[in-house]
Image (cartoon, rainbow, N blue to C red):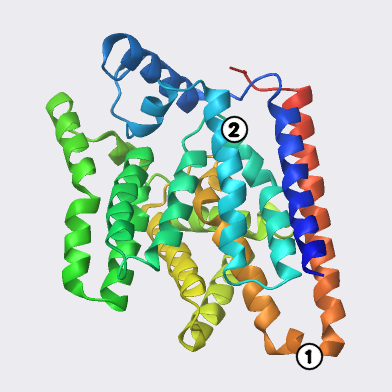
Amino acid sequence: MQARKIKWQLLIALLSIFLWLWLSRKGLGLTTDARAYLYAAQSFREKWTLLTPFGYYTNWTPLFPLLLSILEPKILQSIAFFFNILLIYQLFKSYLKSPFLEIAFAQSILGTTFFLIHFFVWSEAWFLVFLLVLFRLFAHIQTSQYAWLGFILLSNALVMQRLAGIFFVLTFIILIALYWNWKKAVIYTFFANISLFFWYFRNYLIQKKPDFLDNIWVVSFVESWGSYAHTIIQFFFPFPVFLSILSLIIVCTALFLAAKKIPKISNIFVIQGFFLSLGYLLIIFFFRMNVTGESERYLSPIWVFLVGGFWYFLAESTFFKEKKYKIWLYALAALILLYNFLRTAKSLRQWIQNPPDLW
C-alpha cells in the first residue's frame, strides 16, 4: 500500500515536470517586470550596477536580478520549479494523510498558479522556494543554532527577493514571540531586516520617495477585497466575477471557522500555515495592492497554504469524519481536481498557441 501511495505522488510530480518541459520549450513569458529584471541583471553583469531602461533599479528589491545575472532565466526558473515540487510535497506530508496528501499535491503542482509563477520571468517562483524552506525551518529554530542562523539568512533572502517578504517576516515575528519569547522576536526583527534597511538606504540616496508608495491604496476596499476573495474562490471552484462580494463573505466565513479550530490543533505546521496566510491577507487587504488581472500572482505566495488548509480542515471536519459521508468528500475532490486540470489546460494552451513575448 505504501509503495502504491509513493507511485501516485511520483506520477503527479512527473506529470507536472512533463507539462513544464512542454510549456517552456520555446522560452518563458515576458512582462514589464520581467524586462526590468533582465535589464538589471545585464547591467549588473556588465557594469556592476542595477539599472532599468528608465534609470536606477529602485522599484523592486535586488535579489532576483542578481540571480538572473548568474543563470539564464529558463535554468533558474526550472530549478525553482523542481525545488517547489519537493518542498510542497514535504509541506503537505507534515499534516495531510492519504488520500488528501495526493489530492492537495495534485491540485497545487498541476494548478494554473504553479505554472503561472514559473513560466513568466517573475520573482515569485524563488520567493516561494525561500518561504517554504523558512516554513520548514521554523519548527527547529529553538533547538538548533544552524536552523536559527539559516532562518535569519533566508528571511533576508525573502525580503530581498520581493518586498512582500516583509509581510511574512512580520508574521514570523509574532509567531516567535508567541511560541518562545519577545527577546528572540526582537533579535529576529533586527537581523531579518538588516539587508532591507541597507537596500532602502541605498535607494534614499538616489530618490527621496520610495517607489512602492505609488503602488498602495490605489483602489477601493470593496474592489480590492472582492478581487482577492474572488481569486481565492477560483482556486477551488469556477465563480462569477460579479459575485465578488459574496466571495468575500465566503472567504471571511471560512477564515473565521478555521480560526475557531486553531486553538484545538497541536500540529505546528497547520498553525503556522494558517497565521502566515491570515497575516499576508490582512496586510494586502489593508494596503489594497491591486493591479488589474494580477490578483492570482499576488496571492501565489500563500495559495499552497490555502490549498493544504482547505483539505486539512475539510478532512478533519466532524461531518466528513463520518464514514457514510466520505463519498461526498471524494466526489468534491474529484470535481475540484477536474476543474483545476481544465483551468490549467486552458492556460497552457493559451500560452503555447498565443504566446506572450518570449525570452
- Three-letter code for the amino acid on which mark 2 is drawn: Ser
Residue at the image point whose x is 70% and y is 18% from the top = 26
Quadrant where the N terminus sits is bottom right
Residue identifier under label 2: 78
Residue 306 placement (x, y as % from top left): 58, 63
Q: Nearer the viewer, residue 235 or 93?
A: 93
Marker disc for residue 59: none
The disc, 1 or 2, on the residue closer to the chain's N-terminal end is: 2
Residue identifier under label 1: 322
Q: Which residue lies furthest to the top in this view?
A: 46
Residue 217 placement (x, y as % from top left): 36, 48
Nearest-to-viewer mark from 1 and 2: 2
| Residue 245 visible | no
How far, Cα to Cα, is label 1 from label 2?
Answer: 42 Å
Residue at the image point whose x is 75% and y is 59% from the top = 6
> What SS does tag 2 mark?
helix
Residue 100 placement (x, y as % from top left): 72, 69
Q: Nearer the viewer, residue 218 or 230?
A: 230
- Three-letter code for the amino acid on which mark 1 is drawn: Glu
Relative horizontal placement of residue 59, taking residue 35 as reference (left or right): left
Quadrant where the C terminus sits is top right
Whether 199 is drawn above or below 144: the answer is above
Pointer 1 local density, CA inside 10 Å: few below 14, some 14–19, many at least 20: few
Residue 51 placement (x, y as % from top left): 31, 17
Asked if labels 2 and 1 touch by Cβ distance under 8 angstroms, the answer is no
Residue at the image point whose x is 63% and y is 44% from the top = 114
Whether 311 is drawn above or below 53: the answer is below
| Residue 168 visible | yes
